[in-house]
Image (cartoon, rainbow, N blue to C red):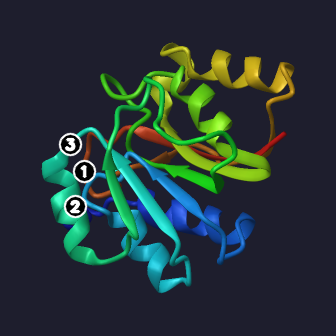
Amino acid sequence: MLSLGYTVPAVAADFVGRHVPPGGKSLDAGVGTGILGDTLRVLGYTNLTGIDLSEAMMDVARKKGAYETLRQMTLGEPLDFPDDSFDAAFSIGVFTEGHAPPESFDELVRVVKPGGWMVFGVRDDVYGGGGFREKMYALEEAEKWSLVEKSAAFPTFPALEQSHGYRMFAYRVS
């Protein structure tokens, strides 16, 4: 994906670096092959836990050595972590068509400590049409989190003619 000019990990790392101080315990929710964790490790984020639906993808991530722990879990289902387990949660590439549902945010908010951070991206077409915008707003209204920063839509693969728009978000958990 990186060879196709995949921009999301770089933008996500920038959002993390602007809002989340290194040193805390962080969850990479939807770790995939560990592209984000590999970048964050270089930036000083060393206490990373990763979860993903695919054991095969986590095998690739495991070889990068960026994660202390990798566990198979499914976003949208209850996560096997106690409340307030993490200082931050990151999620890129999973809030898109046919992947993790908007209800995933409920569990992610539950496992992040009050005052902690959630940094994630949502593909633009599902942000507006897949229930994500409504869910994010409902969590704000319920005072579960507050929006700190939102990017403009940007292309995920700028080198390709057919590239979906993507948005990054940084929320502070209440």
| Crowding near the residue tagged with mark 3, few <14, some 14–19, many ≥20 C-alpha atoms within 10 Å | some
Task: Say whether disc 3 or disc 1 marks the residue closer to the N-terminus.
Answer: 3
Q: Position of residue 147 (x, y in %)?
A: 79, 40
Residue type, mark 3 in image: Ser
Comes first in the chain, label 2 or label 3: 2
Q: Earlier in the sequence, mark 1 or mark 2?
A: 2
| Quarter of the image that includes the C terminus | top right
Q: Which residue is mark 3?
A: 54
Query: Which residue appears at 75% of the width and 23% of the height?
Result: 139
Question: Where 130 sits versus 154, above or below?
Answer: above
Tags 3 and 1 in contact by the CB under 8 Å rule? no
Could you give the CA–CA distance between mark 1 and mark 2, rounded to whole angstroms?
8 Å
Which residue is under mark 2?
4
Q: Quadrant of the N terminus?
A: bottom left
In this orientation, which residue lies closer to the viewer: 154 or 14? 14
Disc 2 is placed on an element classified as helix
Q: Residues at badges 1 and 2 in contact (C-beta under 8 Å)? A: yes
Q: Name the amino acid type tagged 1.
A: Leu
The amino acid on which the numbered mark 2 sits, given as a three-letter code, is Leu
Q: Quadrant of residue 108?
A: top right
Q: Nearer the viewer, mark 2 or mark 3?
A: 3
Q: Which residue is mark 1?
A: 160
Secondary structure beneath disc 3?
loop
Q: Give above or below for 86 relative to 37.
A: above
CA distance for labels 2 and 3: 22 Å
Percent position (x, y) of residue 24?
Answer: 66, 70
Is 83 situated left or right of 99 in this image?
right
Crowd class of label 1 (few under 14; some 14 to 19; many from 20; radius 10 Å): few
> Residue 127: where, in percent of width, then height?
54, 25
